[in-house]
Image (cartoon, grey):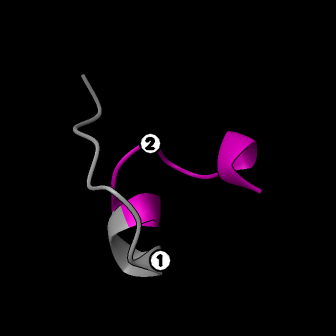
Amino acid sequence: MEAEAPSGAYKLCNGHKPQPES
């Protein structure tokens, strides 16, 4: 799931660690 989702908004929306898409 994580792999095909954006590296930032996805985690934030899911309540995971907010990772900046650098």
* Residue ranking furthest to the front: 17
Q: Is residue 7 above or below residue 12?
A: above
- Which element type, helix, strand or loop, lies under badge 1? helix
Which sits in the foreground, 1 or 16?
Answer: 16
- Which element type, helix, strand or loop, lies under badge 2? loop
Circle 1 residues within 10 Å: few <14, some 14–19, many ≥20:
few
Q: Looking at the picture, how far across and down is residue 18, in whole percent?
A: 26, 55
Q: Quadrant of residue 9?
A: bottom left
Q: Residue at x 67, y 50 (%)?
A: 2
The stretch of residues the image draws in magenta is 1-11
2 vs 1, front mark: 1
Mark sitting on residue 7: 2
Which sits in the foreground, 16 or 21?
Answer: 16
Q: Amino acid at mark 2?
A: Ser
Q: Is residue 16 above or below residue 6?
A: below
Task: Return the disc, 2 or 1, that comes first in the chain's sequence.
Answer: 2
Q: Amino acid at mark 1?
A: Asn
Q: Looking at the picture, how far across and down is residue 15, in whole percent?
A: 38, 77
Q: Quick check: 7 left or right of 21?
A: right
Q: Quick check: 8 left or right of 14?
A: left
Q: Looking at the picture, how far across and down is residue 11, in whole percent?
A: 43, 61
Circle 2 residues within 10 Å: few <14, some 14–19, many ≥20:
some
Q: Looking at the picture, how far across and down is residue 17, in whole percent?
A: 32, 56
Instruction: State if disc 1 and disc 2 touch (CB < 8 Å).
Output: no
Mark sitting on residue 4: none
Q: Quadrant of the N terminus?
A: bottom right
| Distance between mark 2 and mark 1 Cα atoms | 12 Å
Mark sitting on residue 14: 1
Q: Quick check: 4 left or right of 15?
A: right
